[in-house]
Amino acid sequence: MSIKNIEYPSLSLAIPAYNEAGNIEHLIREFLKTEYPNLIEVIVADGGSIDGTQDIINKLSLEDSRVKLLHNPLKIQSAGLNLILQECTGDIFLRADAHSEYAPDYIERCVEALLESKALNVGGAQRFVAKNPFQAGVALASKSFLGSGGAKYRNPNYNGYADTVYLGCFWTKELRDASGFDISQITNQDAELNQKLLNKNPKAIYISSDICVWYYPRKTWKSIFIQYFKYGRGRYLTSIKHTKQLQLRGKLPFLFISATLLLSLIDFIIPQLSLHTEALILTGLLFPFGESLRTTLKFSKSFTTELWRGSEEELPSYLSLWFFCGVTLLTMPIAHFSGYGYQLFRRRFLKVTGW
């Protein structure tokens, strides 16, 4: 099916933003160039930017009446998206992230996939790209099974139904019927929303390799740790909200590290058992760097064309790629475990039910 042969559904583009003065104008202008004939509005929900983001959006709105600004007092993405959902008038609600880049035909391919798949939410793979050495290590880590967890939305060649998707293109009515995004979760709101849609229809989520979007990950070790710590917290909240779904992938870091720590404690208390947990822990610490070496070598030839968006002069060495990829592969499960455990402790012992 081609969208050229059907009536074009009206489409609202939703962008939650905070301090995005460096790229928000380029992002919006690129979307406004779309050949899709029924983009009726580009709505930005700003969480109180202090860098001039709001001035830029207001300037663009004077040039093109489709550009609109909403103020998001809660600041978080889910609240901003819900504000847009309340105000938008399009048949389709297309979410965009200010930290990503989009193919010129992004809107057309999203609408095409939504119509052809009969799904409630569609999107493309999360393609990682980088402009500095640490980002490059994170981008390489996303290519590893340890970094992606086998998630279908991390595979740029996958076409088919899945449990979640990067960003999302929804039928507005279906999104409203699902009560939008859960503002009690700072992160993981996408997965939680998609779980609600899957409860309604097991083929609610569809990924198309024709939909191309590129994501820039965090630039420092501290920021990647905080990100995955929050992911762990959000995954725990989702797991207790949707108790009927196993969600094993999201629980694996917590289950594996918890089991390792428990065995280590038993080995310390009862050394006669000779569980050799020292070897298990050492293997767990070293394995990410072995996997990093394999991944770095595997993508050595395609790295500059597929993952690198920086200058040729700043191209990282293989040694730095190996090291930063290994650090990332080690950090992500530890941070996720820590966040999951922290949220579990808050709920079970402090009786705090929300974030």
Image (spheres, helix red, strand yellow):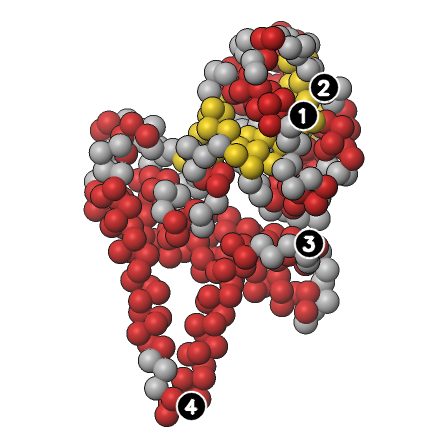
Q: CA distance from mark 2 to mark 3?
A: 30 Å
Which mark, residue 270? Answer: 4
Residue 184 can be seen, yes or no: yes
Q: Which residue is mark 2?
A: 90
Q: Secondary structure at mark 2?
A: loop
Left or right of 317, for residue 48: right
Quarter of the view holding residue 217: top left
Q: Residues within 10 Å of mark 3 (few under 14, many from 20)?
A: some
**Residue toward you, 141 or 120:** 120
Q: Secondary structure at mark 3?
A: loop
Q: Secondary structure at mark 1?
A: strand
Q: Residues within 10 Å of mark 2 (few under 14, many from 20)?
A: many
Query: The residue under label 1 is which amino acid type?
Result: Phe
The extreme front residue here reads 1
Quarter of the view holding residue 69: top right
Query: The residue under label 3 is which amino acid type?
Result: His
Asked if the residues shown at circle 3 and circle 1 are in contact, with their CB atoms under 8 angstroms apart, the answer is no
Image label count: 4
Q: CA distance from mark 3 to mark 1?
A: 24 Å
Q: Is residue 80 above or below residue 3?
A: below
Q: Which residue is mark 1?
A: 93
Asked if the residues shown at circle 3 and circle 4 are in contact, with their CB atoms under 8 angstroms apart, the answer is no
Which mark, residue 113? Answer: none
**Residue toward you, 198 or 165:** 198
- Where's residue 75, x and y in %? 66, 38
Q: CA distance from mark 3 to mark 4?
A: 38 Å
Query: The residue under label 2 is which amino acid type?
Result: Gly
Q: Secondary structure at mark 4?
A: loop
Q: Residues within 10 Å of mark 1 (few under 14, many from 20)?
A: many
Q: Residues within 10 Å of mark 4 (few under 14, many from 20)?
A: few
Asked if the residues shown at circle 2 and circle 1 are in contact, with their CB atoms under 8 angstroms apart, the answer is yes
